[in-house]
Amino acid sequence: MRNIGMLAVVLASGLALAQSAPRTAPAAAPSPFQQEKASEVPDAAKLERSTKSLTGMREVLRDVLGKLEEARRAKDVVKLNCVNEKLTQIKGLLRISEQADVALQEAVARRENTASEHEYTKVMIAQQKVSQLRTEAEKCIGQLAFQADENMSVEVEEPKDLPGGDPTRPRPIEDIVMRPPPASPLQ
């Protein structure tokens, strides 16, 4: 519950920042990472994009669930906790997005532009955050890690200038011959 509350605060603050951002002159060509203004998107396109975004977020959810199972099979508690944290956030954002999609459909039906823009923006911000969380979940698992099998062998060369002996079997400690000093000067 605490994570969902935090997600709602993060999402709401992102919306507040997006809505209160100062208006500047448009750039020559928007980058693919810039989100276009909700007021410039026709209602039909808002509905279509919102539906596509929800579908994409559900795919990310399935993908991250797979990574959670992978961490579970590997019995790696650190990876499991890391992926589970991302999964919890994704679930919260997906739930918020589904509610926003329903509210978007209602706002479009009532022709309430401000409400539809607000709900559309919530879905788009959640989609960006879910995409980021997918990347973070992949980092939790370590996509560059390799899998070892029973046919793998490793050769180790021991340098000749190392001291001898087995470090796993230390030499016994020699008996102390000297008596330690007295604990107090009265003895």
Image (cartoon, rainbow, N blue to C red):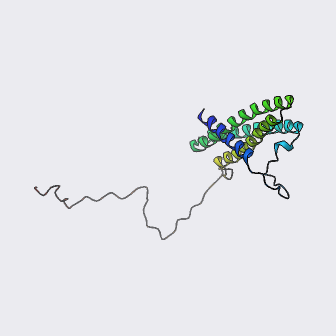
**Residue 48 shows up from this direction:** yes
Image check: 136 left or right of 159?
A: right
- Total labels: the figure holds 0
User: Can you give x and y, in whole percent of width and height, for residue 14 in the image?
Assistant: 70, 44
Indicate the quadrant containing the C terminus: top left, top right, bottom left or bottom right: bottom left
Indicate the quadrant containing the N terminus: top left, top right, bottom left or bottom right: top right
Q: Quarter of the image holding residue 81? A: top right
Q: Residue at x 70, y 40 (%)?
A: 64
Question: Front-most of 82 and 144?
Answer: 82
Question: Front-most of 114 and 105?
Answer: 114
Q: Residue furthest left?
A: 186
Q: Residue at x 67, y 45 (%)?
A: 137
User: Can you give x and y, in whole percent of width and height, for residue 91 in the image?
Assistant: 69, 35
User: Can you give x and y, in whole percent of width and height, for residue 166 in the image?
Assistant: 43, 59
- Above or below residue 119? Residue 164 is below
- Above or below residue 8? Residue 173 is below
**Residue 73 shows up from this direction:** no
- Above or below residue 63? Residue 181 is below
Question: Front-most of 138 and 131?
Answer: 131
User: Can you give x and y, in whole percent of width and height, for residue 45 in the image?
Assistant: 88, 39
